Amino acid sequence: MKLWLDGQVIEEADARISPFDHGFLYGMGVFETFRTYDGFPFLIGDHIKRLQFALDQMNIQAELSTASVMQMIEELRVANGGEDGYFRLNVSAGEREIGLDPSPYTRPLVMLLQKPLAAPPAERHAQWIKLPRNTPETAVRLKSHHYFNNLAARREVPDAKTEGIFLTADGMISEGLASNVYWVKGDTLYTPDVTTGMLAGVTRKMVLSLARAEGIPVREGRFTQSDAEGASEWFVSNSIQEVVPITQFEEREFPDSGPVCSRLKHLYKNKTRLHIESVE
């Protein structure tokens, strides 16, 4: 498929990135993944806000407006045949001499990739990951090029149907390999907070907003495995797969249509039919 690279839609085979790009040399780059629904990139405003925060943290001088990114998405989508897709927006620090120069990056490289959408899974299995979740690069986790902790942990997972769930070094539930995690005990929805090193997910933000609007009690915090014992439902979310129930967590089975997950999944799907840029 074609890609968007620094202002031009080009063939994948024609793409070139300098070996002196600090996104390659030092991991100085950030990205967002999202999908389109009938051509509209759902919650794109929240994705751009999170991307801009990460760019500011890395001192990468790039300002991407929601309108400009939407235009990039549409140009690339049309160039690739007009179908909805999985998109990855990547901003790399750009070329610079070798060395740890702390001055701002003023010539970043912007890239937008697209690939076909797979059907969202109806369910997932889950297991605890033995490798601890690493600590964030700064006070909070950025969606950056520093991704080896996830890749190393992926080796513990037997197949793509299974989601690995991270614990912090001190035993707090954090997040999935590529998702935010939730469980239900009693009438309350639980999910880890950002102090566990998890990524503040855009889909998570919508899920929690929908839960509160429905009157579902929500608790965000630091929870151990023992705190989650006795849960009646587990599920995960991300921007590509939406809301997905966990039907087997190691040796324990869970319903694929638990009342809280099912309700939030339905409400989220309904929201994707609307042109919503940001969660209010």
Image (cartoon, rainbow, N blue to C red):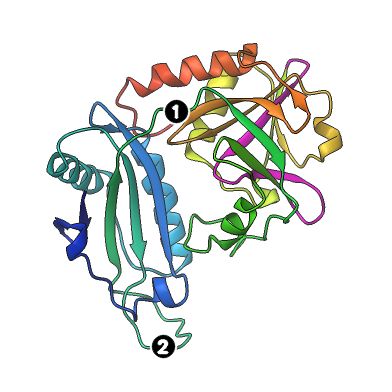
Which of label 2 and label 1 is nearer to you?
A: 1
Give the residue at x 34% y 28%.
276
Under tag 1, what secondary structure?
loop
Whether residue 140 is visible: no
Residue 60 at x, y percent in the picture: 38, 68
Asked if residue 264 is positioned above or below residue 116 in the image, the reply reads above
Q: Amino acid at mark 2?
A: Ile
| Whole-number angstrom distance, CA of label 2 to CA of label 1 | 42 Å
Magenta span includes 254: no
Check disc 1: other Cα within 10 Å, few if <14, some if 14-19, many if 20+.
few
Asked if residue 101 is positioned above or below residue 51 in the image, the reply reads below
Give the residue at x 21% y 48%.
1
The magenta segment: 168-187
Residue 134 at x, y percent in the picture: 67, 60
Residue 72 at x, y percent in the picture: 20, 48
Whether residue 25 is visible: yes
234 or 11: nearer the eye? 11
Under tag 2, what secondary structure?
loop
Asked if residue 127 is positioned above or below residue 273 in the image, the reply reads below
Left or right of 30 on screen, residue 66: left
Q: Which residue is mark 2?
A: 98
161 or 85: nearer the eye? 161
Q: Which mark is residue 120?
A: 1
Q: Amino acid at mark 1?
A: Pro
Residue 40 at x, y percent in the picture: 26, 31
Asked if residue 86 is positioned above or below residue 104 in the image, the reply reads above
